[in-house]
Image (cartoon, coloured by chain):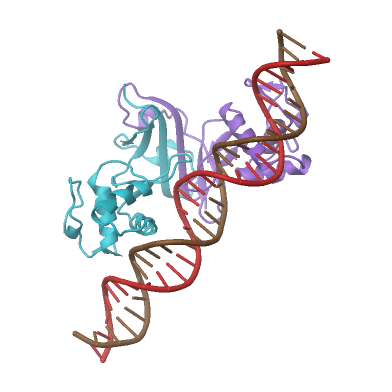
Chain colours: A purple, B cyan, C brown, D red
Amino acid sequence: MISLAQQKNPDPTDFPSELEGLRMTKQRREVLAVILAERDHPKANDVFTRAQKRMPTISLATVYNCLEALVSHNLVRQVNLERESSRYCPNLTDHCHFQDEKSGKIHDVVFKDGVKLEDILELPQGTEVSHLEISLKGTFGQ
Amino acid sequence: MISLAQQKNPDPTDFPSELEGLRMTKQRREVLAVILAERDHPKANDVFTRAQKRMPTISLATVYNCLEALVSHNLVRQVNLERESSRYCPNLTDHCHFQDEKSGKIHDVVFKDGVKLEDILELPQGTEVSHLEISLKGTFGQ
DNA sequence: ACTAAGAATTAGAATAATTCCAAATTTTCA
DNA sequence: TGAAAATTTGGAATTATTCTAATTCTTAGT
């Protein structure tokens, strides 16, 4: 099993032919490689232009298709901030997103050790959380 | 000073001519009244159709304008869930939103007493949070 | 009250992210 | 190998929201 860890120029041919039950086509490999190559939060169109560098024939529709496949198979995380277009995030660990108002840059923010949702929110008995999104805005750091 | 508390059919003429430094025009009054009339989370278009009942000449563009004015003056809260269109919420107290996957309905969820952001997240020194949004999805209650 | 200046409203056009569509290509596996 | 299924593709369609320019309303000063 290969590692999907961050690397400067991930070689898409390193990915096995199937990941998490998802068939790894050339295009999906490339889109995944693009997202793993940088620890940022590109929009679909950014992914498209980056993918075109190594695969000039890829189409935007395919990028959308691939992103949706990768997201639904938990290989990539989709991030929605306010009304902006979706961004895609290579970091699969539990975290949330902070958008700096000055720079527009997005920072991953982790939870303090041992913080559990039930400790924070008043949820009625029997509630099952399948998806949680926390996003912040302001000035990040000083 | 009038109370903006929930009421079955808020009379827009009860609102003073200015609230939070915002001139209360006929249309803004009506849009605010529509939102206060029900404890739900209507989309702009829902607000539009509801407002048309009492004010048939109001336009959708005006509804958008009014909503943006009311939101920026903290009289109404804008709620963004995933990729859906914005919703508007009359509840100005600190809370977050839970969307039930079965019904699609949105529930307000409050924080447990004394929960502070700094206790939950690893934020670098000097960080200033101007906006926080927490949204959940799953089955609400049993 | 009257009027000029500024603000808000309006209808319709424009924008832009995303989804849809139908045809072509690729892959799978019997 | 060849049929069926899945994927890719380019372009069209969709849709929430924003923009525009003209009109109407409101306010303040006289």
The residue lying toward the viewer, choosing from A120 and D9, is: D9
Inspect this view and state whether residue A90 appears: no
Q: Residue at x 31, y 59 (%)?
A: B58
Q: Say if D8 sits above or below B6 in the image.
A: above
Q: Say if D29 sits above or below A130 in the image.
A: below
Q: Say if A115 sits above or below A46 in the image.
A: above
Inspect this view and state whether residue B16 appears: yes
Please state if A94 lies on the left or on the right of A48 as rendered: left
Residue C20: image quadrant is top right
Counting every numbered tag in the picture gives 0
- Residue A44 x %, y %: 62, 43
Q: Residue at x 38, y 26 (%)?
A: B102
- Residue B66 x %, y %: 34, 58
The residue lying toward the viewer, choosing from D30 and B61, is: B61
Q: Residue at x 48, y 34 (%)?
A: A111
The residue lying toward the viewer, choosing from A93 and A43, is: A43
Image quadrant holding the N terminus of chain A, namely: top right
Please state if B93 lies on the left or on the right of B3 as rendered: right
Please state if B22 lies on the left or on the right of A17 as rendered: left
Q: Residue at x 70, y 46 (%)?
A: A49
- Residue B111 x %, y %: 32, 36
- Residue A59 x %, y %: 70, 41
Q: Say if B94 sits above or below A124 in the image.
A: below
